[in-house]
Each structure stands twice: as C-alpha cells, then as structure tokens.
Image (cartoon, rainbow, N blue to C red):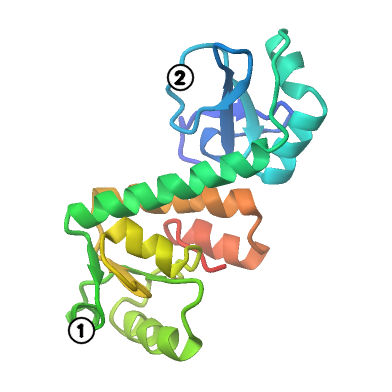
C-alpha cells in the first residue's frame, strides 16, 4: 500500500519501526497512572505509539515499554491486549450503527437482493456464522454489479450486527457507500491489522478500501 504524501508517521515504541499513524495505536497515561488506549488520538498528554498488533501491545505491557517511553511509573493491565481488541470491535460496530442511521446500510433479504440487483451495494457484511450457501450467491451478485468491490467483511457475529443495526437476526447486510461507511471500513482495517489476518486477506484489504474476510 502506498502512503499518501504528507501522511503522519510515528515510531513504534516496541519495534522502533516508523509507520503511518493509522497502523499504530496511541496510548497515554490516565489520571490514576494506568495506561489508556487512545484510539481516536485525541486524549491530552504525551503519547506512546505501538504497532497495531495484539502481539506488539502484549509485548509492550509485559516489558515495561510504556513506563520507559513516558519516563514515569505507569501500569499496564494484564488484559490490555484484549481490551484494545474489544474497543476496536466496538468502534467498528458504532460506525456501522452510524452508517445505518445515515441510510448507507441495507439489511433484510429482499431489500439486499433488490439493492444488489440495482447495483447500489459497494461492500457486503456477513455474520461469522453465515453459511457458505448463503454468502456465495450474494458475493457473486456483488461481483457482477461491482467488479471492483472489496472482499466481504466477516468479522462480526449475527448478534453484533443485529445490535448495531437495531433489528433481529441480521446475517447479511450491504454498504451503499458514503462518509460513515468509509469510516467503518477504516476501523475494520485497523481491526484486521490488530488481529493479524492472513497476509493474502490483509493485502486484499489494503488494496480495496479496507474490507477483509476472516
């Protein structure tokens, strides 16, 4: 993936590699001396940047990287890596909810089929437990109407999708595009990086606007 000219870069406190800011997670010290993930990069104070990878964040917590970087005694909870993943997932689902409110999401079998037939869908989401015989026809229809569409997103359960969209039993949904959809795909990209998707899936994700399959 090419980095846009002028894109901000930061150095990972663990690996010392310089990476685009979007490929790292920022942390700050909270008022109680505990390290706090700053996923929106808006919290005040000196930040510590760590590669967007659960392994690297677990390593930072285990090796005292946060205290050394901040030159202060700060504590990193043992479940920091799991907490960051939960927060990343929550941000994805929050943006899915906002995209839905903005009219950028189509759910429900008939509505989704109709929107696909009209070429209105730009990306698909499938629940993790969705059956292949349910996913494949939708995927084929999307490729037929939008050959450059990214790979479907398969990172969330039906329960998670249903809660985000405010309806029951959501197994498949489509994104029509728009500002909230782009923000959702950006957050999905970070989650994909964090959980360490297979190289092929991640490469496809980087090349096609941020969507991935698990």
Q: Is residue 102 above or below residue 162?
A: above
Q: Is residue 131 above or below residue 55?
A: below
Q: Secondary structure at mark 2?
A: loop
Residue 109 image offset from top left, x and y in percent: 26, 82
Decide which of 143, 213 is in the foreground and name it: 213
Q: Which sits earlier in the primary sequence, circle 2 or circle 1?
A: 2
Q: Is residue 108 left or right of residue 1?
A: left
| Image quadrant in which you'd find residue 17 | top right
CA neighbours of label 2 inside 10 A, class few (<14), some (14 to 19), many (20+):
some
Res. 17 in view: yes
Residue 150 image offset from top left, x and y in percent: 42, 68
Q: Is residue 96 above or below residue 66?
A: below
- Which mark identifies residue 110? 1
Query: Which residue is located at x 19 percent, y 77 percent?
Result: 115
Total marks shown come to 2
Q: Is residue 186 left or right of residue 18?
A: left
| Image quadrant in which you'd find residue 76 | top right
- Which residue in the structure is indicated by mark 2? 43
Q: Is residue 57 left or right of residue 97?
A: right
Decide which of 145, 124 is in the foreground and name it: 124
Q: Secondary structure at mark 1?
A: helix
Decide which of 134, 162 is in the foreground and name it: 162
Query: Which residue is located at x 38 percent, y 89 percent?
Result: 137
Residue 200 image offset from top left, x and y in percent: 63, 67
Decide which of 125, 200 is in the foreground and name it: 125
Query: Which residue is located at x 46 percent, y 79 percent?
Result: 130
Q: Is residue 48 left or right of residue 99?
A: right
Res. 15 in view: no
Report the Cα–Cα distance between label 2 and label 1. 44 Å
| Image quadrant in which you'd find residue 46 | top right
């Amino acid at each position: 993936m090419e980095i846009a000219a002028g894109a901000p870069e930061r150095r990972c406190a663990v690996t010392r590699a310089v990476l685009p800011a979007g490929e790292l997670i920022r942390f700050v010290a909270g008022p109680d001396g505990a390290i706090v993930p700053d996923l929106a990069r808006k919290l005040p104070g000196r930040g510590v940047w760590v590669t967007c990878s659960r392994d690297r964040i677990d390593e930072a917590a285990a090796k005292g990287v946060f205290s050394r970087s901040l030159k202060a005694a700060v504590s990193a909870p043992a479940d920091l890596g799991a907490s960051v993943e939960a927060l990343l997932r929550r941000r994805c689902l929050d943006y899915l909810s906002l995209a839905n409110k903005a009219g950028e999401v189509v759910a429900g079998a008939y509505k989704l089929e109709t929107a696909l037939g009209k070429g209105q869908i730009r990306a698909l989401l499938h629940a993790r437990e969705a059956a292949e015989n349910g996913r494949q026809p939708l995927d084929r229809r999307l490729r037929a109407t939008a050959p450059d569409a990214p790979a479907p997103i398969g990172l969330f359960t039906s329960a998670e999708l249903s809660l985000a969209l405010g309806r029951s039993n959501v197994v498949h949904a489509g994104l029509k595009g728009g500002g909230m959809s782009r923000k959702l795909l950006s957050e999905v990209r970070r989650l994909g990086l964090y959980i360490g998707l297979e190289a092929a899936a991640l490469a496809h994700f980087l090349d096609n606007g941020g969507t991935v399959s698990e």
